[in-house]
Image (spheres, rainbow, N blue to C red):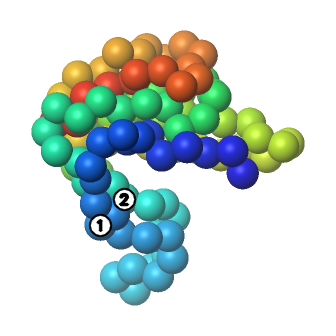
Amino acid sequence: MAFNYPLQGEQYKSTSSFGPRWGSTHKGIDLKANSGTRVLAAAQGEVVKSDDNSDPSGYGGQILIKHNIDGKTYYTRYAHLRKRYVQTGEKVYNKKIAIVH
């Protein structure tokens, strides 16, 4: 799979891994970074959501990107964002997409 860490060159901490968590399966990897850290798209894709969501998920400012890699579809979500630089429908690759809150 061709994903890059979206916080390359910045210090971050993994706070949750893929797999069992709190009695269910966590389908992602959570990374915590310092406020103001730049966020890059982890792979080429299309922004399917970019908003200041206030739903019960608690994500706050978020971006969801759809990736098609080797015939499979994957999604990456970036949450708790202070500033977003991309809009729904935009194609991204190795581009600054946001700033961490």
Amino acid type at image mark 1: Thr
Between 17 and 26, the residue placed more toward the observer is 17
Say what secondary structure mark 2 lies in.
strand
Asked whether, in this view, residue 23 is left or right of residue 41, the answer is left
Q: CA distance from mark 1 to mark 2?
A: 5 Å
Question: 99 and 5: which one is in front?
Answer: 5
Relative vertical location of residue 25 with respect to residue 59 in this rendering, above or below: below
Instruction: Residue at 36% x, 33% y: name it.
Output: 39
- Is residue 12 visible in the rendered image? The answer is yes
Task: Say if mark 1 contacts mark 2, CB within 8 Å.
Answer: yes
Element under disc 1: strand
Residue at x 54%, y 25% (from the top left corner): 94
Pointer 1 residue: 15
> Which residue is farthest bottom?
23
Answer with mark 1 or mark 2, whichever residue precedes in sequence. 1
Amino acid, disc 2: Asp
Report the side of 98 relative to 66 (left or right).
left
Q: Where residue 88 appears, x then y in whole percent?
A: 48, 17
Left or right: 23 in relation to 92:
left
The residue that disc 2 covers is 30
Considering every residue shown, the one lying at the far front of the view is 9
Query: Residue 82's quadrant in the figure?
Result: top left
Residue 54 in picture, x, y percent from top left: 21, 37
Q: Please state which of residues 25 and 32 is positioned toward the viewer in this rendering.
A: 32
Nearer to us in this view, 63 or 31: 31
Does residue 15 lie above or below 24 as drawn? above
Write down the quadrant of residue 80 in the picture.
top left
